[in-house]
Image: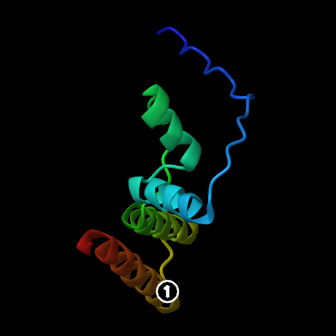
């Protein structure tokens, strides 16, 4: 399998002045679209696909849910089959919190 081509580094800058209203509208539109302002301008002006996206609130909640599940997996791994009542209570609480985070993310 061939190596992917390196992305050309972006070192050039352009200084553009905006009014306060234009500035707020620009950032709000970028946030709504889930990308940063630079990526939005590249997309609109040059038709260049964004390289990274800003996490939407829903995506952020899902990421937090997955992170909570990873913490649970680490806890179970640390217990290594030796469950005490205290460990089971801790595990149960973590599972409940993770489930709530994921449920909140899926409801939206």
Q: Is residue 89 above or below residue 32?
A: below
Residue 72, image x, y percentages: 47, 70
What residue is at 51 percent from the left and 75 percent from the top? 82
- Above or below, comparing residue 43 to residue 86 in the picture: above
Question: Which residue occupies the extreme front position in the image?
Answer: 19
Q: Residue at x 49, y 64 (%)?
A: 67
Q: Position of residue 15 (x, y in %)?
A: 72, 41
Q: Nearer the viewer, residue 74 or 41?
A: 41
Nearest to the observer: residue 60 or residue 96: 60
Q: Which residue in the protein does label 1 denote?
A: 90
Give the farthest residue toward the left.
Answer: 107
State the residue at coordinates (24%, 74%).
107
Q: Is residue 5 left or right of residue 33?
A: right
Q: What quarter of the picture does the C terminus occupy?
A: bottom left
Q: How many marks?
A: 1
Q: Which of 87/6 is in front?
A: 6
Q: Where residue 55 sits: x, y (%)?
A: 47, 57
Left or right: residue 68 compared with residue 101 = right
Q: Residues within 10 Å of mark 1 (few under 14, many from 20)?
A: few
Q: Position of residue 6 (x, y in %)?
A: 62, 18
Residue in the foreground of this view, choosing between 41 and 52: 41
* Applied colour scheme: rainbow
Residue 79 in view, yes or no: yes
Rendered view: 89 above or below 23: below
Tell me the SS state at disc 1: helix
Tell me, yes or no, if residue 52 can be seen here.
no
């Amino acid at each position: 399998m061939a190596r992917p081509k390196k992305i050309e580094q972006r070192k050039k800058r352009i200084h553009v002045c905006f009014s306060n209203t234009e500035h707020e509208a620009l950032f709000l539109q970028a946030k709504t679209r889930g990308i940063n302002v630079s990526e939005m301008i590249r997309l609109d002006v040059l038709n260049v696909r964004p390289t990274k996206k800003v996490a939407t609130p829903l995506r952020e909640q899902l990421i937090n849910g997955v992170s909570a599940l990873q913490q649970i997996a680490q806890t179970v791994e640390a217990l290594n089959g030796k469950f005490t009542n205290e460990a089971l209570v801790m595990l149960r609480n973590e599972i409940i919190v993770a489930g709530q985070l994921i449920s909140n993310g899926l409801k939206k």
